[in-house]
Amino acid sequence: MYRKIFINFVTIFLCTSAAVSQQVTPQRIVQGEWIKTWLMCGPFPLKEQKDPALSSEHLDGFSTDYLIKAGGEKNLTAKAGDVVKFKNGSAKWTIYSSADSLIDLDNAVSRNDPVMAYAYTEIEADKSGIWFLGLGSNDGGSLWINGLKLWDYTLPRGLSVDDDMIPVLLKKGNNKVLLKIADRGNRWGFCARMLPFSVEKLAERGSLFNITSGLNGEVMIVSEMVTAVLDQLVQKIDVKIVNQQQKVVLEEQRNSDFCGKINLVPDEFQSYNAFISISLKSGESLNQKISFYAGNRTDYTLFSEGKSYYRIILGAEASESEKWAAGELQHWIREISGAEISIGEMNNQYPGPQIYIGYNDLVKEKTGDEVPADLDESFRYCSKGADVFIFGGKIRGSMYGVMAFLEN
């Protein structure tokens, strides 16, 4: 009898061990269907940011890779029952299957906050290619596909289906998916599914490329997509950049290495427009217009402690509205700062910096802009060194430019 009980005990123990160490079964991709089965691990503690300047960043502790001993977030190997130890605690991987779209982390992991948790699964693709991963989360988090970090969102938000449509490159066969989801309070969860990739959806969701510029004047083409996805998607890009005078200052074509430094060397800080024509390997195309500022930025002080070294300048043929605008500029600078700025004429020499109102020969020389029509109500203001130029059509353009300058 005792032998029978012992054998039954061993059998039960072995069955329990097998269940505890269960690996997640790869789920075959069916477009539009929710991914319902995940290995979950958590909760891991987070702390509110004390520095207000970091309020748009992840909570303190989110960037910690708790999975180092299991390959790390980029190369995870995990199964149900594995334990992840951390300072003052531990968490166990468990299998969680949902009956619907929502992976309810409050029920699956913890109702405490602020915390974060990992969710891991594997999906099986019939062939290699680009898909959208439709993701909704409450709150932010990070995503890795086959070790590549493809998504990162730092702010609190409510869960909305397909809030993010993330282009992902899947290989034929098994693909590893790891999510890291934060909880700042209230409900906690996510939903995820694979959707067919389309250029139309991509265009609806935003730009494929963007342009950034650093304080040193360096200009870069960047993308939220990783290089592997871009290389599968894009055949070539043609880039044209024009300056404020609508002059083309750069044209180039890229057939690879689509992101990176642009050979634009601005002589001063100013605005530009970039026109990017994107040819896709599918034969389709996209066009983007991106406005950006670039150049070495220098700060000049218009007034300080009730004083200003500037003077307002009007041309000899200034219109009545330009003269009125000069008076308004003088008045409001005095109201704001207490500084009294004089209004002078161009034929009088002045050693300090000046604010030029209205178009004239000096504006043409400094900016290269052609004379605007008198009835043109558009305007432009820019700086050349410490000098400021505000000009447009004589009837209203320059006046509107001064008003906009005061507002900004």
Image (tube, rainbow, N blue to C red):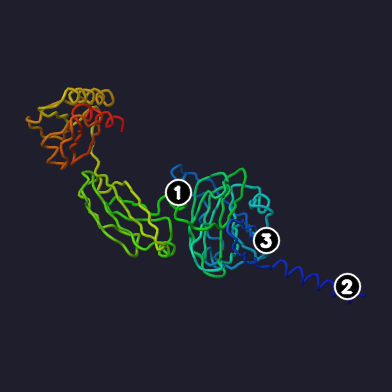
2 or 1: tag closer to the N-terminus: 2
Is residue 325 shown above or below 369?
above
Q: State how far apart marks 2 and 1 are (Cα).
A: 65 Å
Label 3 crowd (10 A; few <14 / some 14-19 / many >=20): many
Q: Nearer the viewer, residue 111 or 238?
A: 238
Q: Nearer the viewer, residue 304 or 120?
A: 120
Q: Residue at label 2?
A: 5
Q: Residue at x 85, y 74 (%)?
A: 6
Q: Report whether 316 appears left or right of 252.
A: left
Q: Amino acid at mark 2?
A: Ile
Residue 270 position in % (x across, y down)? 25, 44
Q: Position of residue 222 (x, y in %)?
A: 37, 56
Q: Quadrant of the C terminus?
A: top left
- Verify CB contact (< 8 Å) between mark 2 and mark 1: no
Inspect the image, locate mark 3, and give the three-letter code of the amino acid beneath it.
Answer: Ile
Q: Nearer the viewer, mark 2 or mark 1?
A: 1
Give the number of the disc on residue 204: 1
Foreground: disc 3 or disc 2: 3
Q: Residue at x 59, y 58 (%)?
A: 118
Q: What is the secondary structure assignment of the residue under circle 3? A: strand
**Label placed on residue 95:** 3
Look at 64% across and 57% down and name the residue there.
36
Q: Is residue 78 left or right of residue 205?
A: right
